[in-house]
Image (cartoon, helix red, strand yellow):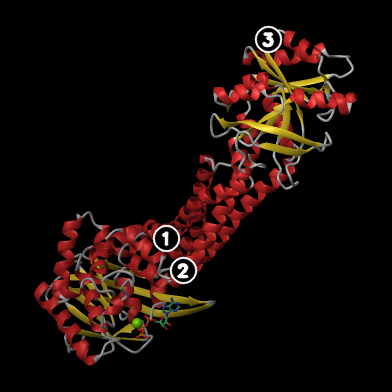
Amino acid sequence: MHILKILFKNAFRHKLRTALTILSITIAILAFSLLRTVISAWYAGVDASSASRLVTRNAVSLIFTLPLSYEEKIRQTEGVRIVSYGNWFGGIYIDEKNFFANFAVDPKTYLDLYPEFMLTGEEKNAFLRDRKSFVAGRKLAEKYGWKIGDIITLRGTIYPGNWEFVMRGIYRGRDETTDESQFFFHWDYLNETLKKTAPERADQIGWYMIGVTNPDLATEVAERIDRTFKNSIAETLTETEKAFQLGFVSMSNAIITAIRLVSLVVIVIILAVVANTMVMTSRERIGEYAIFKTLGFGGWRIAGLIVGESLVITMTGCAIGVALTFPTAKLFGHTMGTYFPVFNVGNDTIGYAIVSSVLVGILAAIIPTYRAIKIPIAEGLRSIG
Amino acid sequence: MENKAPIVEVRHVSKCYHRGSQIIPVLQDITFDIGDGEFLALMGPSGSGKSTLLNLIAGIDKVDAGTITVGGIDITTLSEMDLARWRSVNVGFIFQFYNLIPVLTAFENVELPLLLTSLSKAERRAHVEMALRVVNLLDRMDHYPKQLSGGQQQRVAIARAIVTDPTILVADEPTGDLDRVSTGEIMELMDTLNTESGKTIIMVTHDPRAARKAHHIRNLDKGVLDSDAHP
Ligand SMILES: Nc1ncnc2c1ncn2[C@@H]1O[C@H](COP(=O)(O)OP(=O)(O)OP(=O)(O)O)[C@@H](O)[C@H]1O
Ligand SMILES: [Mg+2]
């Protein structure tokens, strides 16, 4: 007979009580893992950003643009390998609920600068040739059932009117952290149209994207660029892509903190639930622990029985919770895909869930263990019968 | 039989319990010996301190004053941990309510004390089966306590008590919860253990029929032990 067998038999003696406790732990671990996945999804853009890319924007704010004429000057800056540019388009597909990132870019340089967006040679050529075409990420295309050659209409918000685009390619991400839900089209198409409808808005750039020759020199290059445009009509702010992304993310710092807090509270709640179960259980077992002690089982072994039982319960709940996390996250990622382009359950999340469960299992057993060890055997035995 | 060297020596043992600020004296200056291989019955009215005395000898309670020596070891000086180890080797326990672990089978209950030894699984199995054969329950070893009658449960408890081959067997009203037939069986078994295996037995009982198997009967009244009496 194995001690483990005693632990399992003890844990499932009160089937309903144990089942309910395990259910609570399962739900809590599920909630904990999903909340943590939301946080890491939030930061996914930051993680995916490249150290060898810079972003230049208007020093005042992102909503102010920069002149197209800066492109040439930036390209000539020492340490710059390639320059691309883009504008946030903010178009709506059929309904506002269908949110996804869509922007106008200079296609050739953009694809060069972002090798993680992978197109077949054929798709790439078709996209570059057709000025009214666009490329979408795999997830996005799957979600709306778009096929190559489909004509998609976006309703402009920043740029009014109905805009038609032809799908010429579906890009795949190079790895899991790549956002596969973007929509990008020719900046020229936007600009040519603006020249006719709103000429004062033409030749304006939302942000420049810059590839540097040497990532180690990225900060120097950034300073050099900003120096170039010092005291001009539109001063620039150049930072690494990472810093740029973090700027977006930190706007929502308060929300992130709130989510973190909630995920912590969830753990505290299961601690209370498991502790309650263990206190009830061990109170009923005082007589049995006295029998074990009578037979010569020492304090450590009694502690092992109680902590072990507590761990059996918490780890069962944890295992089910973790197992459910993956399909649930998949479902979640499917429906929220465009808000959280990368929604993968990280190993660290699972690690934290397991470590928290182990801690909960041990902490919940402390008081019952202390009581069971402290009570004199004779007194414990008197509780039988 | 009277000439055998004492295996248990109780010297000037006193014990009281505290109930709030009230002090309840239970045992007062008890001194007596139990010979090796003796079968002693402790009798006396309810609340006279029989269980308390038995618990002290078995090392599951602490004296207030006096010493108890078992097999040459003064157990009143042992630490909690040493006492636990000492019990696992030297004492076999039999209780009124059998005190089996309900989630374990008869076999597993008997095996329990052996988990504290360095015996291999096969050796443990051999010991358990031998003990169950002594109490004639080998065919019930996969039964859980609630699938056994009271008498059978008590026999499992006896198997558990003897499986480690302890120095002394202590029994607190082992037949207190049993009918006449089962009582007869259990007492027969205790008698066999005493006469054939030479086990020293200290048994608390209310039942004069049970006490008849003992060599000595001692009466405890209001914490004081009377002189020796033979059944
Ligand atoms: N843990 C305790 N706390 C307080 N009083 C106790 C405790 N244990 C025993 N007593 C008291 O000590 C006295 C002797 O108890 P003990 O159990 O030894 O009696 P007993 O002779 O075995 O009685 P019975 O025949 O009913 O089993 C009783 O008055 C009992 O109430
Ligand atoms: Mg008693």
Answer with the quarter of the image where residue B219 lies.
bottom left
Q: Name the element at disc 2.
A: helix
Q: Which residue sits at x=42%, y=58%? A: A312
Chain letter of disc 1 in the image: A
Q: Earlier in the sequence, mark 2 or mark 3?
A: 3
Residue type beneath disc 1 = Glu
In the drawing, what numbered circle is on residue A281? 2
Q: Which residue sits at x=33%, y=83%? A: B224
Circle 3 residue: A79
The answer to whether any part of residue A38 appears in the image is yes
Circle 1 residue: A309
Taking the image in four quarters, ligand 1 sits in the one at: bottom left
Residue type beneath disc 2 = Thr
**Does B229 sit above or below residue A262?**
below
Please state which of the two labelled residues, at mark 1 or mark 3, is closer to the viewer: 3
A367 and A205: which is toward the camera: A205
Chain letter of disc 2 in the image: A
Q: Earlier in the sequence, mark 1 or mark 3?
A: 3
